[in-house]
Image (cartoon, rainbow, N blue to C red):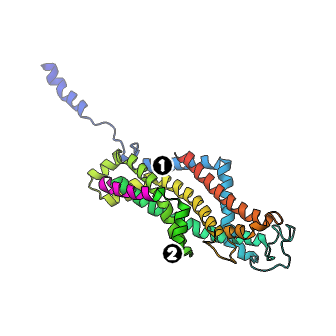
Amino acid sequence: MDFLSKGGPETVTALSVPGPAVADDAAPGTGEGTLAAGAGVVRRRVRALLRRPTFVISVLVVAWWVGAAATWRLFGLNPYTNTGHLLAAPSWSEPFGTDDLGRSVFARTLAGADSALAVGPLGAVVAAILGSTLGVIAGYFRGWVDTLFMRLFDVLVVLPPLIFLIVVVGAFGASAPALIVIIGVVFAPGIARIIRAAVLAEMGKKYVTTARLQGESALRIMATELVPNVLPTIIIQATLSLAAAILMTATLSFLGLGAQPPSPDWGLAINDNRVFIESAWWTVVFPAAAVASLVVATHLIADNLKEVWS
């Protein structure tokens, strides 16, 4: 007892001494540590993308056409002027030759990037916003909301996109705003289904449960918790939709339902000059190569993003 009475206070005191304090921001997975870790992951993935030749080349191709659409007027190119030489073969003065009306195919190919990058990308943006919104809502609420949206998506997805576009364009016209909205509606269901699946995979995770227990509103959880975590999937699907939208726009112009003469639109140029494919191949090959290069480059960008971010 003497031992206990002598050593007790000292023992209690020793056991009561608190250990070294741990700073909150040093805790793994919280605060600044999480932000730094996230930034590090992004940097590593960007470096991985830049080491991929297909990604870099594809970005350069897309940048070339974006630059062409923005600057062709600054170089004095006129896609509507008769040069005086009909169906002239490619030469130093006319690198892509001339068409049956004597217009420069080089000027028309560069100017054609205007319509390709005006309707297609905006339609893809509309599809990404609409599809992502519906997909997040369906995945979050589930139940009858999910069932209603999925049945609607099923109906729209099974419709052949080109036939659906032809019918709708015939009914509402082929103006640029109408085409943008129509393309957005056509591609939105496919994006919505994929985003819904991504949201369902996130719903069982701890951060969603924690946000609900903290009393956060459904809108806040969807906007600040779910959307950032499925954002890579949204970007990938938007990029894939961009390629499809560009090709669809060119197809509509080829069928006479998009841009109208004398527009330098690539699809229209291919249709107008296809009768000269044997005698003046350059009038068709260069616009077709422009469409192919932009669509393939956009697809490769999406594929690389998917491989690195998945």
Of all residues, the one furthest to the left in this rendering is: 1
Of callouts 2 and 1, which one flags the residue occurring earlier in the amino acid sequence?
1
* Residue 46 in sight here: no
* Residue 74 in sight here: yes
For the N terminus, the image quarter is top left
Left or right of 253? Residue 98 is right
| Above or below for 4 versus 62 | above
At 65% from the left and 71% from the top, the residue drawn is 114
Left or right of 90? Residue 161 is left
Where in the figure is residue 218, as x and y percent of width and height?
31, 58
| Above or below for 33 versus 1 | below
Q: Is residue 133 magenta?
A: no
At 43% from the left and 51% from the top, the residue drawn is 229
- What residue type is disc 1 on? Gly
Where in the figure is residue 68, as x and y percent of width and height?
70, 68
Identify the main secondary structure in magenta. Answer: helix
Label 1 secondary element = helix
Instruction: Compare residues 142 and 182 and report the one nearer the observer.
Output: 182
The residues colored magenta run 141-155
Left or right of 297? Residue 306 is left
Q: Nearer the viewer, mark 2 or mark 1?
A: 2
| Residue matched to label 1 | 38
- What residue type is disc 2 on? Phe
Where in the figure is residue 27, as x and y percent of width and height?
38, 43
Where residue 137 sits, quadrant-wise, is: bottom left
| Residue matched to label 2 | 172
At 28% from the left and 37% from the top, the residue drawn is 18
Q: Is residue 148 magenta?
A: yes
Label 2 secondary element = helix
Distance of label 2 from label 1 (alpha carbons): 46 Å
At 83% from the left and 71% from the top, the residue drawn is 87
Residue 49 disc label:
none
